[in-house]
Image (cartoon, helix red, strand yellow):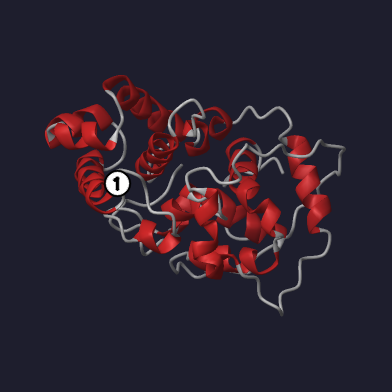
Amino acid sequence: MESLNPKAEENSGFNEEQLGVVVVPAMKLEVVETGSFVKDEEPTVGIKTDDEANSLKMAKKSKHAHAPVNWKAMWDGIAGMRAEKSAAVDAQGCETFNDMTLDPPVRRFHVLVACMLSSQTKDPVTAAAMGRLRAHGLTVESMLAIKQADLAAMLRPVGFFNNKAKYIQQTCATLQSSYQSDIPSTYEGLVALPGVGPKMATLTMSWICVDIHVHRIANRLGWAKTWAKGGKSQDPEKTRKELEDWLPREHWHEINVLLVGFGQQLCTPLRPKC
C-alpha cells in the first residue's frame, strides 16, 4: 500500500503528486451481477473478535448521515469489474498475511507487521519483505533477538526501512511486556504503538482504511466530500469519518481491497479507465 512514512503516518496527509488528479464528477458504472463477499471465519483480520466491542465508539454511525444516492449500485458495479481479483492488493495486500494456519497471536502479529511495512511501499515490495521475514521466523521474540541493522537489511527496499526496523523492534518490546506477545485489541492500543498511525490501525482491525486510492475514488464517486483543493494537504482521516457515517458496518472490511484494486487497475490517478 502506498502511504506515508511511519513517523508522519499520524498526520495522514496526501500530497497532490501522490493523488495525481483533482476531483472529477461521480463515475457512471455499469451495474453487473456479482456474488456476495464471503467473510473469513473471523470478521476481523488482526483483532480478537471477542474484544471488538472495546472500541465501539469507532464503529458508531452518525444519526444524521445520509447514504449517497445509488451507492450500492456503484458498489456492485465496481465489484463486478473487480470480479477476477487480479490486482496486486488481492495477492499481496496486507490482508493476505492473515494466515489461518498460524496461532492467532502470531497471525495477528503478521498482519500488523505487514501494515507497518506497507506505508510508502507498493504491495509487491511489502509482500517480498514479508516473505523474507517469514523465512527468518516472524514472531515477537525473533524480531527482538535480531540486530536492528540486520532487520533493516531484511526489509530493504521497503520505504523507510531503517525507521521501520526500529519501530518494529520498539513495538515488539511493548507487545512482549504489555500484551503477552499478542497485539492490542483496540484502536487506541494500536495507535499508541511506535510507528503505527490511524491508517495502519484501521487496516489491522479490518475497519475502513483510507489510502490514496480510497481517498481519490471515494471523492470521485461522491461518497465523500473531502478533496482539498488549491494545493492543500489531503486529509484521509476526514474521508474515513465521512464513510463511517453512512456505509453499513458489514461493508467496512471490504471497502479497502475493493477500491484499492479498482484504483490500481482501472480508476488510476492519471488517464483513468473508469
> Residue drawn at (35%, 45%), measured in percent from left and top?
182
Q: Is residue 235 left or right of residue 274?
A: left
Task: Residue 199: name its quadrant.
Answer: bottom left
Tell me where residue 274 appears, x and y as whole percent: 72, 44
Q: Nearer the viewer, residue 227 or 76?
A: 76
Q: Is residue 109 left or right of residue 95?
A: left
Element marked by disc 1 = loop
Task: Check disc 1 and report the residue beneath it.
Answer: 180
Q: Is residue 216 left or right of residue 55?
A: right
Q: Is residue 28 visible?
A: no
Kind of residue at disc 1: Gln
Q: Nearer the viewer, residue 226 or 198?
A: 198
- Label 1 crowd (10 A; few <14 / some 14-19 / many >=20): few
Tell me where residue 39 appears, x and y as whole percent: 67, 39
Q: Is residue 215 visible?
A: yes
> Residue drawn at (14%, 37%), measured in percent from left and top?
148
Tell me where residue 185 appears, x and y as whole percent: 43, 54
Q: Nearer the viewer, residue 119 or 228?
A: 119
